[in-house]
Amino acid sequence: MSAANKIRIGIIGAGNIGGVHAKEFTKLSEQCEVTAITDAYLPLAEEKAKLYGIANVAASPEELINRADVDAVVIGVPNQFHAPLAIGALEAGKHVLLEKPMGINSEAAGQIYRAAKKTDRIVMIAHQMRWESIAMQIKEQVERGELGKIYTAKTGWYRRKGIPGWGTWFTRMDQSGGGPLIDIGVHMLDLALYMMGNPKPVSVYGSTYAAFGPERKGIGTWGRPNWDGIYDVEDLATAMIKMEDGSSLTLEVSWAVHMDTENAPFVHLMGTEGGASYRGAAGKLLTEKFDRPLETPLSKPENDEGERTRLSRHFLESIRDGKQPITSALTGFTNNLILDAIYESSRTGNEVKLNWEGIE
């Protein structure tokens, strides 16, 4: 591919996740070029620019968004800034790869969704777990009908001791939108719905708890604590989500909990003809043959290029082909709608019906 046909990428946010995106898109140099990067702390952007050979460090997100040599913007910043930056990029004619969650809440996600439709630009949510090898193998079997009708599923991620950045934006409701539910729970929710075949959710019943964070317990190794900061989010959440087709999904996540846990994400699918289990780096298909239970183990192939590389390539292909990515703006909005309903159900103690008004 000639340099003139390469998709030119700008990255907003030079922290850990911004560095991951810079690394992955640099691997795909035949298809794209990372032309600019920025961060609220410019020395960090300059560091990443030097590390990955990025020619330009923009002084601000607005400057990067309006650069003529940027076709698509990657946004990896705190949740509260997702909507304004994504909408600004879309209105400037750029495509957007947006870190999860799509918005700090469903209102913000809905604004991004409508902006994407209005501008006819691609918005893709960076849910890399959909591109993990075992998840893809299970999804293929689901699409082939090997599991029959999936009538219920269970997903979650119990971390034993893993509250990130106590007192920083991670643990402030006004900046993050929530705790483990919106942090790691959104990954599991997204993956489970996708593996189930994207049934339409219609109602939610859920509860959230803060047993560790307010006591400054359960602190993990991610991020640097700010002991003068605020902790007003949950550290455990559980929910039941009911679908229009009658199926259901149970979601359970924690940053900290007194429980025997493998600290690994999991999805269990239960279908009429078979099931699938995915936990950490292992998976299996389950069915019954000749009146006996049968299990088929699944494993990652040797020399697997990795889920992040596949995600990045899919974003480029979506732009080039003019097709909606599998983690589209609609899926991102769906996730935010469910998360909001779980928080509301926990506050009220009631089941919450999902409001799809104005969303196709």
Image (tube, rainbow, N blue to C red):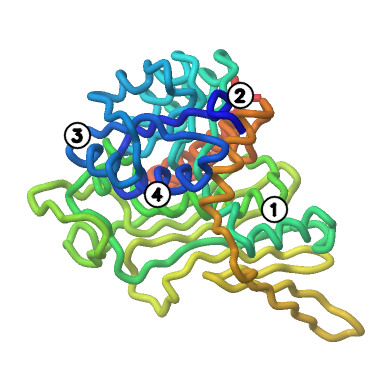
Instruction: Compare marks 2 and 3 and give the one earlier in the sequence.
Output: 3
Instruction: Compare marks 1 and 3 and give the one earlier in the sequence.
Output: 3
Instruction: Tell me: residue 337, above or below residue 246.
Output: above
Residue 337 pos. (x, y %): 51, 36
Instruction: Compare marks 3 and 4 and give the one earlier in the sequence.
Output: 4
Helix, strand or loop at mark 1: helix
10 Å crowding of disc 2: few (<14), some (14-19), many (20+): few
Residue on which disc 3 sits: 42
**Number of dots carrying numbers:** 4
User: Is residue 213 toward the left or the right of residue 331 in the image?
Assistant: left
Residue type beneath disc 2: Ile
Residue on which disc 1 sits: 196
Quadrant of the rendered structure where residue 263 is? bottom left
Instruction: Compare marks 1 and 4 and give the one earlier in the sequence.
Output: 4
Asked if residue 306 shows in the view, the reply is yes
Residue type beneath disc 1: Met
User: Looking at this view, is 119 or 73 the one in front?
Assistant: 73
Residue 27 pos. (x, y %): 49, 48
CA gap, disc 1 to disc 3? 42 Å
Residue type beneath disc 4: Val
Residue type beneath disc 3: Leu
